[in-house]
Image: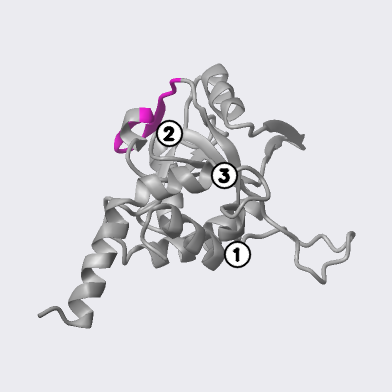
């Protein structure tokens, strides 16, 4: 005779198996539909968009569409010497990643941090920096400037080098792009200023890590 606990385990397994299908259905909903209400931090696109072939470099080897296939991926661009947005975002995303640790690895969303400053950010330096925030962050870059720009542009992310005395800094998009398990652009996560922040306060726009964690867990089929 089935007990309640056993029944819940069966139901959870079914939802896990249907996770990819559920994500596809939610993201295919048109704006204003029921699917949109399911998301707190993510703005889904009505139709996922294919990403051209790319290859990034990491300490663990090439990062390509094939290495990302099968799991939801959040992509964030930045650089190691970034003074504010990057460490703030990676700190918040580490909280979301911590929440995902309870999920089976095959379902667990991943964070891909891509440096847009390959002149200074070697794969080794980049890996040490990113993993300081969370050990499961995938950190990569592309030393070829044209290929790196093409990758960022394919995700509708932008960046530029800004002279700063005898050195330089980088301006870049603070939004994060969500790739589905087929490595297609499926949505965007935009940071928001605090509700009480004045326009001239210099406050940094941030994400809600728990909202991001819930949104991606739903897409992975691991949450109701």
- Is residue 148 in the magenta section? no
Per the model, the C-alpha gap separating discs 1 and 2 is 24 Å
Q: Please identify, in this view, whether the residue under mark 2 or under mark 3 is nearer the observer.
A: 3
Q: In the displayed structure, does residue 83 sit left or right of residue 13?
A: right
Percent from the top left, x then y, of residue 156?
64, 31
Q: Residue at 66% across / 45% down in the picture?
A: 31
Quadrant of the image occupied by residue 146: top right
Could you say which is closer to the camera, residue 101 or residue 36? 36
Q: Is residue 140 above or below residue 53?
A: below
User: What kind of element bears circle 1?
Assistant: loop
Percent from the top left, x then y, of residue 193?
75, 61
Q: In the displayed structure, does residue 116 sit left or right of residue 160?
A: left
The total of numbered circles placed on residues is 3
Quadrant of the image occupied by residue 53: top left
Boundaries of the magenta span: 53-65
Residue under circle 2?
Answer: 183
Circles 1, 2 touching at the beta carbon (< 8 Å): no
Residue under circle 3?
Answer: 29
Q: Residues within 10 Å of mark 3 (few under 14, many from 20)?
A: some
Circles 1, 3 touching at the beta carbon (< 8 Å): no
The residue positioned farthest toward the front in the image shown: 1
Residue under circle 1?
Answer: 208
Q: Quadrant of the C terminus?
A: bottom left
Q: Quadrant of the N terminus?
A: bottom left
């Amino acid at each position: 005779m089935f007990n309640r606990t056993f029944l819940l385990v069966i139901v959870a397994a079914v939802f896990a198996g249907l996770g990819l299908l559920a994500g596809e259905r939610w993201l295919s909903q048109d704006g204003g539909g029921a699917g949109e209400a399911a998301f707190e931090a993510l703005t889904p696109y009505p139709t996922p968009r294919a990403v051209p072939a790319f290859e990034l470099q990491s300490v663990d080897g090439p990062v390509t569409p094939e290495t990302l296939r099968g799991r939801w991926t959040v992509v964030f661009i930045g650089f190691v010497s970034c003074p504010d947005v990057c460490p703030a975002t990676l700190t918040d995303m580490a909280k979301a990643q911590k929440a995902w640790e309870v999920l089976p690895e095959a379902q667990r969303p991943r964070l891909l941090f891509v440096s847009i400053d390959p002149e200074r950010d070697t794969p080794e330096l980049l890996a040490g920096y990113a993993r300081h925030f969370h050990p499961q962050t995938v950190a990569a870059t592309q030393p070829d400037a044209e290929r790196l720009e093409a990758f960022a542009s394919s995700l509708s992310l932008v960046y530029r080098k800004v002279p700063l005395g005898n050195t330089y800094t980088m301006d870049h998009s603070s939004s994060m792009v969500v790739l589905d398990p087929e490595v297609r652009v499926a949505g965007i996560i935009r940071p928001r200023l605090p509700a009480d922040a004045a326009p001239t306060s210099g406050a940094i726009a941030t994400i809600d890590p728990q909202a991001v964690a819930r949104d991606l867990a739903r897409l992975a089929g691991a949450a109701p």
